[in-house]
Image: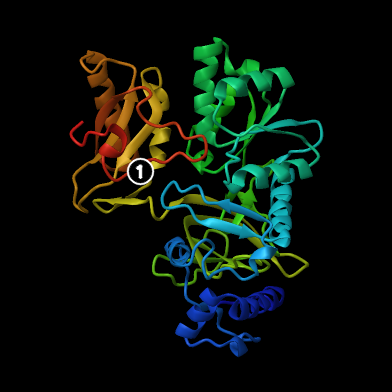
Amino acid sequence: MSILLRPEEESELLSALTRAAYNSPFWRERFFASGIKPSDFKSGFDFASLPFVTKADLLRDQAQSPPFGRLLSVPEDKIVRVHKTSGTSATPFFIALTAQDIADTVLSAQRAFKAAGMGAGQRVVHCLNFSMWSGGVSDYLGIEATGATAIPFGVGNTAQLLHTIRTLKANAISATPSYMYVLRDRCRQELGIDPRELGLRYGYFGGEGLLQVPGVREDIERSFGLVAVDANYGMSEVLSIIGGEDASRDGLINHAHGILYTELVDGDGRPVPIEAGAVGELVFSSLRRQGQPLFRYRTNDLAQIVWVEEADDGLLRMRFRIIGRTDEMLVVRGVNFFPQSLLSVIPPFEEHVSRFYRVVRPTRPDQEAVKVLMETNLDHDDPRLAQIERAFCHNVSSTFQIRITIGWLKVGTIPREANKARYLVADEADITGNPNA
């Protein structure tokens, strides 16, 4: 099945593909292996004939040709900044950016933050990792570009963060949603204050899809007295910020128009037409990236299109929602289940059950029940814990049509990630250190 390209998109893509064929050994070899020559990149080229590329391909390339791999498409002296991916699910990938790559990254971030409502009069404390992760400095520059007052705090010292917010009277925060639960607990435990007393009124969140989980947005807003916006969807190796909500909070607006070409594909990699209601895996291609251009990059992110239209400039505009990740979706006795969705079941039990948990990946497709490692402040022999377990398992069964068993842990056992929370582990020992715990 061929892909319908608009004239502006086709022109940009053909130019990008031609540059990559001449400048990147990685792409030149992949094109040749698919029987594609640089002279083929002309009007009418079947874009769907290009092979997909995955994160595993990029990591393998860098491992074989360190530090930047054969993917690199510019001389090394043109690289002005190096980032890396977060490495939560794999070895980090090093990202080489030219001056133009940085400018495009900041442009998309500025579009997203401004659409989300950020601007002059807001004092935004930015709490994403500055230690090479692109969400730190790249997103921070986007905050500055909106005209807001930016406070580059980073992560790693929550006590100092609380002091900084109160001292500087910050009224907005940029962070991952999961970090807000750490912040909430520390407000109560260390300062003895209601988190609302911090004075935060605006929350710009990203790095995770948790605001799309029922109840999470409302819980954060209720706890802090702020308006929570999913302002930051992206991936370091593609573009730090690709999409974000506006005031309507009705899906993520694609802010990467003119920078990325977007596709949807089904589970078999076949193109899915981008139209309202369509569901598929997001696939991105670089239109302008100089350092490490990507074509037909499979993201593992499942999206549903909310609306789509062609603008006057010939580029596609769209809103979409992230449903989950294909590499985290479990199929439990024929039922599709995303581990992070358990967050929606926790609120009635929060007095004794932590929001930090891990789902242990099933070892067999016919496994009767999924094991969940959860934290509680109750002793294991407390009779209330058995009652909570029965009620929680019943709610999960009725909501998701799957069975779970629970392994109880003490509060604080599960790591508190400030960047990206993860909910799926291969083995209990990943958390407890004891496979029989």
Residue 198 drawn at (x, y percent): 65, 18
Q: Residue furthest bottom?
A: 39
Question: At which x and y percent is residue 80?
Answer: 69, 57
- Of residues 8 and 432, the one drawn nearer to the viewer in this rendering: 432
Q: Amino acid at mark 1?
A: Leu
* Above/below status of 69 relative to 396: below
- The crowd level at tag 1 (other Cα within 10 Å; few <14, some 14-19, many 20+) is many
Identify the residue shown where x is 26% and y is 34%. Answer: 433
Position above or below: 190 against 274: above
Residue pictured at 42% horizontal, 34% vertical: 343
Question: Residue at coordinates 55% horizontally, 17% vertically from top-left?
Answer: 187
- Quarter of image, res 412: top left
The residue pinned by badge 1 equals 424
Give the mark count: 1
From the viewer's perspective, tell me whether residue 56 is left or right of residue 97.
left
**Circle 1 SS class:** strand
